[in-house]
Amino acid sequence: MAALAIVPLFLLIPLIAKYQDISHAAQMASRYAAFDATINNPSTNGTKDPAVLAQEVRRRFFSNIDAPIRSNDAAGSFLAHQNLFWRDPAGNSLISDINAVEVSVAPAGPSGSAILSTLAPAFGLPDRPLFRGAVSVPLANLPAGIRSYEPFDQLDLRVDRSTTVLVDGWNGRNLAVVRSRVSRGNPAGAVLSQVGPVLSLPVVVFELDSVRPPRIGELQRWDDVVPADRLRARGP
């Protein structure tokens, strides 16, 4: 009685491991597709051709890992390009048609609250879209007629995995970019920086120059400055 339950489970363990390996490959492929969008999106270099991206994903994640890398190479469903671990008990590939693996990258919506989305243009900041990379892998059914593999012989399984990334983190390339954004979002700062010396004059007079006057409208106070003792003269 125990063997009736244990033997089928024992026979399914290798197949479950293969399904898990395909699922892991699909997750890694979705990450590849999503992070590719961080450098290939409308706000940078433009989007990559979906056919090219799908070809890269199929070749790099769902084909034979020992296959040589060639320029403009595409994964095929023939034996030389198949992952030899992903095979059913009859020796057939668990991914019957590698070209049926679907890959897509699309905006998943804006990031942040409505308040941030409203204030961003005032600071010259682009909308921070979320891009979602999705991979869908259709799996072949197991051979029919083997009781231990039922109902895997007719389930038409599909592995779907996705990864979502934030494309633009609003990071400033340098100090000048940060100042420009802050100044743009605070027009009053430009006016205050002009009248700042006049407003600071009473502080200098009444405090007899013992208290540093406020630097109104100036952004230098928030500059990232390396202490002098941390700097070393560059050699010849």
Image (cartoon, rainbow, N blue to C red):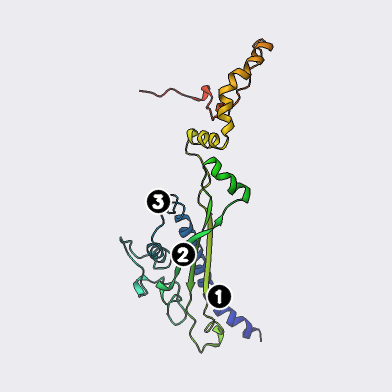
| Label 3 crowd (10 A; few <14 / some 14-19 / many >=20) | few
Report, in whole angstroms, how far the alpha carbon at label 1 lies from the one at label 3: 46 Å
Residue topped by disc 2: 104
Please report whichever mark, 1 or 2, sits nearer to the chain's N-terminal start.
1
- Secondary structure under badge 2? strand
Q: Where is residue 178 in the image (x, y as percent from the top left)?
A: 52, 36
Q: In which quarter of the image is residue 206?
A: top right
Please report whichever mark, 1 or 3, sits nearer to the chain's N-terminal start.
1
Residue extending farthest bottom:
145
| Label 1 crowd (10 A; few <14 / some 14-19 / many >=20) | few
Q: Which amino acid does label 2 sit on?
A: Ser
Q: Where is residue 156 in the image (x, y as percent from the top left)?
A: 52, 80
Q: Are marks 2 and 3 in contact (CB under 8 Å)?
A: no
In the visual, does 194 lie left or right of 85? right
- Which residue is painted at 55% across and 75% down in the image? 13
Q: Which amino acid does label 1 sit on?
A: Ile
Residue topped by disc 3: 45
Report, in whole angstroms, how far the alpha carbon at label 2 lies from the one at label 3: 18 Å
Q: Nearer the viewer, residue 16 or 204?
A: 204
Which label lies toward us, 2 or 3?
3
Report, in whole angstroms, how far the alpha carbon at label 1 lies from the one at label 2: 31 Å
